[in-house]
Image (cartoon, helix red, strand yellow):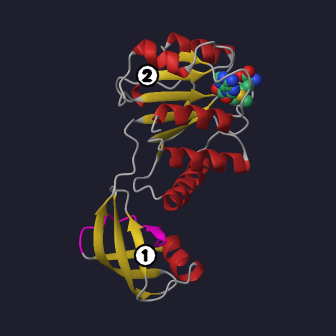
Amino acid sequence: MTHRYFVETPITGDRARLSGPEAHHLSGVMRVKVGEEVTLFDDGGAEFLCRVEQLSKHEVQLAVLSRLEINREAARDVTLFCALPRGDRQKRLIEQSVELGVRRFVPLRTKRAVVQPDADVCERLRRGVLEASKQCRRNRLMEVSEACTAPPPEELLPAGALKLIAHPGSNLSPSAAARAANISPTTPIALLVGPEGGFSDEEAAAALAAGWQPVDLGPRILRIETAAVALTAWAVGEW
Ligand code: SAM
């Protein structure tokens, strides 16, 4: 299997060019040589088998050998509105969201959050998306939107989405909520997962008033990233 690199400029012809950190990763870290083959993706859905023609530390010129249309996206549009944990757990949350096929990740600003997502944090999350996409061979990048407050305003939701808020003690399983709403395998689902301290009473009440259905993930209290991953795996529903 060839190594994968992300190219920001969409590939349209028989040449491609890598620059910046991706060029450095290819030449300086992976020590790829002229004549070797690598895979490029450009967030357009396809991947490209390419041969390295010229390289320096800062720039790599490649010949495009073939374009492969490989759809690795989930059929369902899942948007995850999620409070952020700290450090490595934040990295894992992003990695697993990409792997599971979340289409859009929106960091949540909540009253009890330990990490308030500013522009630097969002930028770090986007770098995590790139790394995870290279690893899991996804050809489209999970979008990381600007942070929003809880509950998210309606205009940030996909049209017709089933809206589920993870709230311990709700006594309604996600499957029961989906059955009651009679959703199809392609109905979009929006998920709302709270911070370590949980949603405040005001946030939870506002979410319920806005039509979010509270769902329960079992009798144990899960950490943010565990709750997000469990709910996402269920929502994507690929197995
Ligand atoms: N003390 C907090 C509470 O009772 O809400 C626990 C917060 S938990 C560490 C972080 C988030 O994960 C929660 O706000 C909720 O969205 C989700 N969560 C964790 N365990 C859950 C469960 N058993 N059922 C539903 N949601 C859960």
Q: Is residue 31 above or below residue 195?
A: below
Is residue 4 part of the magenta span, yes or no? yes
Q: Is residue 33 left or right of residue 155?
A: right
Residue 80 rendering spot, x and y as whole percentages: 52, 35
Residue 108 located within the stretch drawn in magenta: no
Percent position of residue 56, x then y:
48, 87
Q: Main secondary structure of the magenta part?
A: loop
- Residue behind mark 1: 38
* Point 45% across, 81% down: residue: 59
Name which residue lies at 35% across and 25% down. 184
For residue 131, above or below residue 27: above
> Residue 194: x and y, percent?
64, 28
Q: Residues within 10 Å of mark 2 (few under 14, many from 20)?
A: many
- Mark 2 and mark 1 in contact? Answer it, CB < 8 Å: no
Q: Secondary structure at mark 2?
A: strand
Q: Which portion, as a residue range, is magenta? A: 1-13
Total count of labels: 2
Is residue 111 something one can see in this rendering? no
Identify residue type, mark 1. Answer: Val
Q: Which quadrant of the frame does ligand 1 lie within?
A: top right
Whichever of labels 2 and 1 marks the residue nearer the N terminus, that label is 1
Secondary structure found at label 1: strand
Residue 223 visible in image = yes
What residue is rendered at 52% in x and 49% in y?
99
Residue 162 numbered mark, or none: 2
Tell me which amino acid carries mark 2: Leu
Is disc 1 surrounded by few (<14), some (14 to 19) or many (20+) residues within 10 Å? some
Q: Nearer the viewer, residue 105 or 228?
A: 228
Q: Quadrant of residue 109?
A: top right
Task: Say left or right for 221 vs 234.
Answer: right
Picture layout, residue 133 above or below residue 163: below
